[in-house]
Amino acid sequence: MSFSLSESDVIHTIVETIRKEHPQSTKLLVLLLKEKLMLSEKQITNLILKLQEEGVIELEQSPPSPSQKFTSFLKTSEACWYWMIVVITFVAATIFFAIPEHAYPWVYLRYVLSTFFVLWLPGYSLTKTLFLDYPFSGKNLDLVERLGLSIGLSLAIVSIIGLLLNYTPWGLRLTPIVLSLSALTIILATIGAIREYQVHMSSSD
């Protein structure tokens, strides 16, 4: 078996990854090592099995756990972003209807939340659906990329919603826009949470 690194370096990387990351299965260890070694999954798996047989490494196999329900997943820390979107969407929509245009200085709070609600939340929900920010998803974005995509996609989503509402009986008015944007944001965030839940379940097998 030939390696781009020396075999001793590969073994050292495997041992250090186990020591620092504490993977609970061979599958998770292979996924972690693929980011560090220029080897195929088959090569990494064969080497891990060989090192286990020789007693060089030992993976702690956790007992199988029952399948986690989606509602239980939403209560974990991985789903905090979902509840953040739900709460901010609800608060922004409530303040929009509760604070009139002439209610100074409270109207400035309405302006700030409305800007945040229009220019960031819809696009952020869509990026969470398209690009999972989750270990081993393979599509993680850094903060700058996610921020830029969120703003750009939010502008596109608002434009499309406005265009569609223009051809409905409700017309292009603020109330239908706020309600439609709120509903779409929650729907996209829910789809993103479901996809993260599926990745979570597959990685824990």
Image: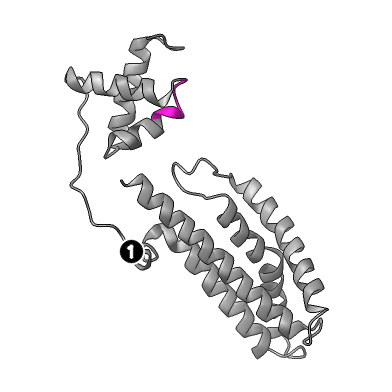
The N terminus lies in which quarter of the figure?
A: top left
* Left or right side of 151 for 159: right
Rendered location of residue 198, percent (x, y): 42, 54
Rendered location of residue 2, percent (x, y): 41, 9
Count the labels in the image.
Answer: 1
Residue 79 in the magenta stretch? The answer is no
Rendered location of residue 136, percent (x, y): 44, 41
Rendered location of residue 47, percent (x, y): 30, 19
Tell me, yes or no, if residue 109 can be seen here.
Answer: no
Q: Label 1, on which residue?
A: 69
Nearer to the camera, 2 or 178:
2
Residue at point 76%, 61% (across, down): 156
Which residues lie in the magenta part?
33-38
- The secondary structure that most of the magenta stretch takes on is loop
Residue 35 in the magenta stretch? The answer is yes
- Secondary structure of the residue carrying tag 1 is loop
